[in-house]
Image (spheres, coloured by chain):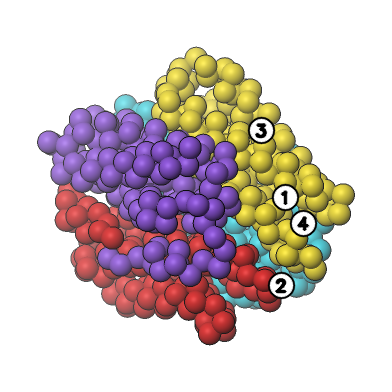
Chain colours: A purple, B red, C cyan, D yellow
Amino acid sequence: METAVRGMLNTYPAGLGGIDADALARCIEQCISCAQACTACADACLSEGMVGDLTACIRTDMDCADICTATAAVLSRHTGYDADVTQAIVAACLTVCQACAAECERHAEAHEHCRICADACRNCAAACADLLDRLE
Amino acid sequence: METAVRGMLNTYPAGLGGIDADALARCIEQCISCAQACTACADACLSEGMVGDLTACIRTDMDCADICTATAAVLSRHTGYDADVTQAIVAACLTVCQACAAECERHAEAHEHCRICADACRNCAAACADLLDRLE
Amino acid sequence: METAVRGMLNTYPAGLGGIDADALARCIEQCISCAQACTACADACLSEGMVGDLTACIRTDMDCADICTATAAVLSRHTGYDADVTQAIVAACLTVCQACAAECERHAEAHEHCRICADACRNCAAACADLLDRLE
Amino acid sequence: METAVRGMLNTYPAGLGGIDADALARCIEQCISCAQACTACADACLSEGMVGDLTACIRTDMDCADICTATAAVLSRHTGYDADVTQAIVAACLTVCQACAAECERHAEAHEHCRICADACRNCAAACADLLDRLE
């Protein structure tokens, strides 16, 4: 799938405040992909016979989806990349992606959707950590 | 960018209720891509000198982003694809994507971000229309 | 709880395009209250021992929360109240609130959170229906 | 407006992990009220003649709305209140509410919607700070 993330960044009429456009685009892309994977994983967990064993996974998936969606939106605005707000939301996103990856990994052997979702969370966590490094 | 949309669909533990998996995946992908493009376009419009001429575009971008995000989430759950809910939200998404495409096209020559956003809205509208055809 | 919905509406610098401010405020308030109730009900369902019997309820709760949140945001913008977009999203919100109310009512005797959530959905559906009547 | 926040909390089938129910309910209520005020304030700013002077306010409003909405959803789930995730998202919410309050206060004399929005942001920041104190 080709998203418009990089195309939109290239047309931005003002500067990006010194932030690396590639790291920013990667983080936005990972956030929107991770949000979708978490929503789908929560739903797939609800279809498993052992749903009672997956309630922590479903909840963490939903938290992760909500925070990734908010983070993608904040990063898609160029509010000023040195700002406390950007750092705080990317830090929250990193935290929830790590938590969700750890939880999904516990079920990755039993459930392929948890394995794919854990990968999406790990990729998003890495993109958040990389962006945070550049913001500080 | 490689999203996990199709991978997650393939692992779904229950059936998709007769819906075409490809049309569904395409619609989810277009919704999340369009939501991001609209958020970024609204922000780019705010950086234009002539922002006063772009307020209708900014508002429609924001409506489109919100509705596309909700639609992607609903479609990522398999609540039952013959359902009234799915039809109603995809119909709303088609409506707002058409409205946002039309508004962005008015500014597409002057602003490259509006041109890219209009394309994202047209692609999403087409995917919604295609999915609606299959749901009815 | 006192929200700022009505205060914000009263300060709006432009006209509301003939829409009744009271019906609009009520619909926004019901949407944000219903979205929260549905998110909390989905989570409460996940804590029930019989979670396997509540998966349809959890999914519908999540769809309802997403669509109510998007509807509240669209209505909080004054994009032009005769518009197709507003009608389409309020119609989708009405549909999902009715579906979620019906599903939660099936569990209302067993689970007090489903009873409260069904009430929130019924109230939101009524506010959506009332607003739709005035938009047409 | 009467929300269902407290009613839902009272019916929760599991414990709240030692968190104060009143502080939690207040924070959820303030988050959903603040998100709505910020969305409405951004839209009202777009209707002002001097919209070019309000672009920072509009962007911060939108960031604040997105983060408050995500925070309300995470807090409406009882994922475990000692968790890093809850602390991180409430900290991000506190940060953006303070930033948005400060920006809106700069326009509060000129624009009543900015004054009301600044109040909503201050109230939400206070509720977030109070909840954070209790989580640590």
What distance separates the C-alpha of mark 3 from that of mark 1?
A: 18 Å
- Structural crowding at the residue carrying mark 4, measured as other residues with C-alpha within 10 Å and reported as few (<14), some (14–19) or many (≥20): many
- Which quadrant of the rendered structure holds the N terminus of chain A? bottom left
* Residue D125 numbered tag: 3
**Chain of the residue under label 1:** C
Give the label, 4 or 2, closer to the camera. Answer: 2
Give the label, 3 or 2, closer to the camera. Answer: 2
Three-letter amino acid code of the residue under disc 2:
Gly
What distance separates the C-alpha of mark 3 from that of mark 2?
A: 31 Å
What residue is pinned by disc 1? C5
What residue is pinned by disc 2? B52
Marks 1 and 4 in Cβ contact (< 8 Å): yes
**Chain of the residue under label 4:** C
At mark 3, the secondary structure is helix
Work out whether residue B135 or residue C115 is closer to the camera in this orientation and state it: B135
Work out whether residue C126 or residue C41 is closer to the camera in this orientation and state it: C41
What distance separates the C-alpha of mark 4 from that of mark 3?
A: 22 Å
**Relative to D136, is D120 on the left or the right?**
right
* Residue C9 numbered tag: 4
Give the label, 1 or 2, closer to the camera. Answer: 2
Marks 4 and 2 in Cβ contact (< 8 Å): no
The vertical placement of B13 against D128, above or below, is: below
